[in-house]
Image: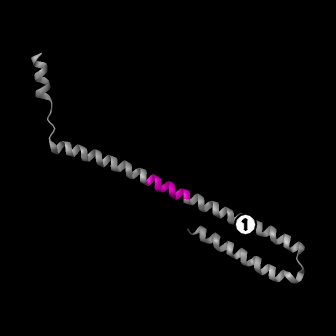
Amino acid sequence: MEGAGALETNEMPSVTFAEKTKTLNRRRGSYKAKITKLQSFLKDKASNAEQLLLRSKLDKVSEMYSSMEALKIEYYEVVEDEQLPNLEFILEEMEDDLEEIKVGLQTL
């Protein structure tokens, strides 16, 4: 079994400090790349979450606009004619505000 023992000691390659460092640097680079991919994934998901939040708010603006139309119709049923100009002015201002909010959300 001398041959087997000699084979183990003579044929085992000796790893130098430089080679070991090179291997570790490659592994570190691989881990860094994986971390960067995960960070990018999280940022993309955050961005998508923000988009969903914006979409939700836009939907809310649309709902409010529809509700304003229903409110306007209800007002027309009960308000006296002399009150209509002031009421219409107030409702138009509110609709303008909703439009500004809608445009603002769409440009984010």
Residue that numbered label 1 is attached to: 64
Residue occupying the far top of the picture: 1
| Rendered image quadrant of residue 86 | bottom right
Q: Name the amino acid, label 1.
A: Met
Taking the spot 76% from the left edge, 79% from the top edge, the residue there is 90
Q: Does the segment drawn in magenta span residue 78? A: no
Residue 31 x, y percent position in the rendering: 33, 47
Residue 11 x, y percent position in the rendering: 13, 28
Residue 52 x, y percent position in the rendering: 59, 58
Taking the spot 18% from the left edge, 43% from the top edge, the residue there is 19
106 sits left or right of 69 in the view? left
Q: Quadrant of the C terminus?
A: bottom right
- Magenta span dominant secondary structure: helix
Secondary structure beneath label 1: helix
Q: Quadrant of the N terminus?
A: top left
| Rendered image quadrant of residue 80 | bottom right
Q: Total marks drawn? A: 1
| Rendered image quadrant of residue 9 | top left
66 sits left or right of 105 in the view? right
Range shown magenta: 40-49
Disc 1 packing (10 Å; few <14; some 14–19; many ≥20) = some
Residue 91 x, y percent position in the rendering: 76, 76
Taking the spot 43% from the left edge, 54% from the top edge, the residue there is 40
